[in-house]
Image: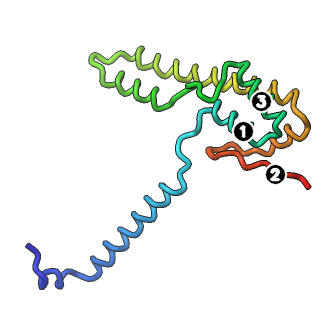
Amino acid sequence: MITLPKLASFPRWLVVVSLGLNLVLIVVVGGHVLFHPGPPPNPVQLVARMADALPAADAEKLRLALKSEGLTPDRRGFEPEAILDQARVALRAEPFDPASFDAIFRKGLADRDATEQAVLRAVTAAAAIMSEEGRHRLADLHCLHHMPPPPTSKS
């Protein structure tokens, strides 16, 4: 058991270093939690949310183009976590089957590519029939991992 006199003999510099390291840890973890955008959104959901920043008529054109490609916001597209979960199961399997492991990633990549190509076709088709204002708003969107900015009115 540590008594008060033993605690008082603890070197002060060690306490200061410990407090400093704790402060650094808190800042690093807090910064990661506050500023990390998280995983990228599903491309179908992202484009559907992009439509919210467009004029109503152009937004409808984009939504219809997505629907014509079979892409709806509730569609389950490429899910990286599901692929990684399947890969983990394959890695733990005894005996290990490299072909099965490879097939998991090839199917995941093919699903991702097919979804992204369908999104590209839909956006291209919609842009071809959009108004000039709609195309300009579409060009102004920045689709990192965040929601698109609200529409700005030109006065």
Residue marked by disc 2 = 152
Mark 1 burial class by Cα count in 10 Å: few <14, some 14-19, many 20+ = many
- Label ID, residue 50: 1
Give the CA separation, mark 1 to mark 2: 14 Å
Quadrant location, the C terminus: bottom right
Q: Which numbered disc, 1 or 2, marks the residue that appears first in the sequence?
A: 1
Q: Is residue 48 left or right of residue 136?
A: left
- Front residue of 4/90: it is 4
* SS type, badge 1: helix
Horizontal and vertical percent position of residue 153: 85, 52
- Tell me if label 1 and label 2 are in contact, CB under 8 Å: no
Q: Which numbered disc, 3 or 2, marks the residue that appears first in the sequence?
A: 3
- Label ID, residue 62: 3
Give the CA separation, mark 3 to mark 2: 19 Å
- Tell me if label 3 and label 1 are in contact, CB under 8 Å: yes
Inspect the image, locate mark 2, and give the three-letter code of the amino acid beneath it.
Thr
